[in-house]
Image: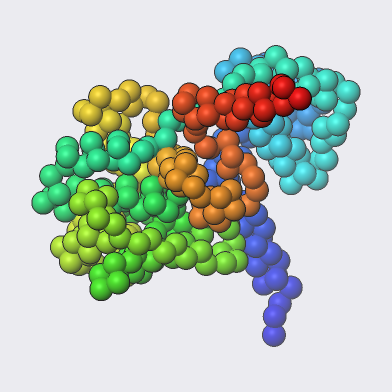
Amino acid sequence: MIQLQELMAQNQITQSFKYAKGSADNVVSAIRQFFYFTAYFNLVPIPATGHTITLFLEFMARTSGYGHIKHLLSSVKYLHDALDFPLKIDSFQIDTTLQGLKRRLARVPFQVLPITPDILRKIYHQLDLSSPRNLALWCSFLVAFYGLLRKANTVPKSNSEDESKALLRRNIHVDEQNKMVYVYVGHSKTNNFCERDVVLPIPGNEDPALDPVRHLARLFKTVKCQSDKPAFSYSNSKCINHSYFTSTLKKLLRMVGYNPDLFSGHSFRRGGATFLHNSGGTALMVKACGDWSSLCFTRYLYLTESQRLTAQNLIRHAINSRACM
């Protein structure tokens, strides 16, 4: 028979699932910053007044952008709700401070440059693929590019961490006979609760450097590991992780003549989306292949000056065709 205490204990566990681990860590960090602030200025943290909140936001605005300010406020509100001290964040003081900070801190967001096939080819010639580690890294680059994947979906944060979001060996099937790679993505930023499986069918191609079938087949034959190991493992206990993925990418970019500060792990997602769009892919194709839940992906698409000129020429031709009417 289920006891009331068991239900209460289970509910505590259930409530702990409100945030994903990364989000929970961010909330805890924000709350910690709030307590540091109130302790330093000798202010009462709970229940906080509107005056205390506005001063906290103003102080944090010295080093934070508007998006982070909103996150800080949300975290402080969560703290008060959890302790049954509802925080009124729609007060005149707080609302005016937020609107003022939004205008004062307005800036053009920095976007990393996209990885292109030409960049990938240059990187390929810098890698000795007889090394299992380099081979695993190269395969992770290719899958991230063709799959329009986020870094978090491609590789785990660390070798030892059980990352359900990152691809595992069982999530990638290589069909050499039909020259196809099938990537099964069961978790993503827009699919937090694994409500659907996204299957990415990636065909092989004739480019020796960029053929995913060729390189993945070689990796899986060279490095044998269990199906629940990270997809880009290069031994039974080691794999390509976040740190190595990004740091090595930047080293390779510098080697081939690019400024590594202008790129990041997210450059593969942006690069894949841009290349697909520029190759004739429709907006619906880009959205579906990248598993976007809205049209926000359009800000990822990178148009060169030449492409922008082509767009303007469309307008010029339309005007000229009517000029003699």
For this orientation, the residue located farthest to the bottom is: 1
Looking at the rendered image, the quarter that the C terminus falls into is: top right
Q: Nearer the viewer, residue 190 or 34?
A: 190
Above or below, comparing residue 21 to residue 34 in the picture:
below
Identify the residue at image location x=60%, y=30%: 314
Q: Is residue 108 visible?
A: yes
In this rendering, position of residue 261 left or right of residue 313? left
Q: Quadrant of residue 291?
A: bottom right
Identify the residue at image location x=33%, y=66%: 180
Looking at the rendered image, the quarter that the N terminus falls into is: bottom right
Task: Return the x and y of residue 62 as percentages of the image width and height.
Answer: 61, 15
Q: Is residue 50 visible?
A: no
Q: How is the image coloured?
A: rainbow
Identify the residue at image location x=17%, y=37%: 126
In this rendering, position of residue 285 left or right of residue 260? right
Above or below, comparing residue 115 to residue 254 in the picture:
below
Task: Return the x and y of residue 282 as percentages of the image width and height.
Answer: 56, 50
Identify the residue at image location x=77%, y=44%: 81
Q: Nearer the viewer, residue 52 or 99?
A: 99
Q: How many marks?
A: 0
Above or below, comparing residue 265 to residue 175 in the picture:
above
In this rendering, position of residue 199 left or right of residue 130? right
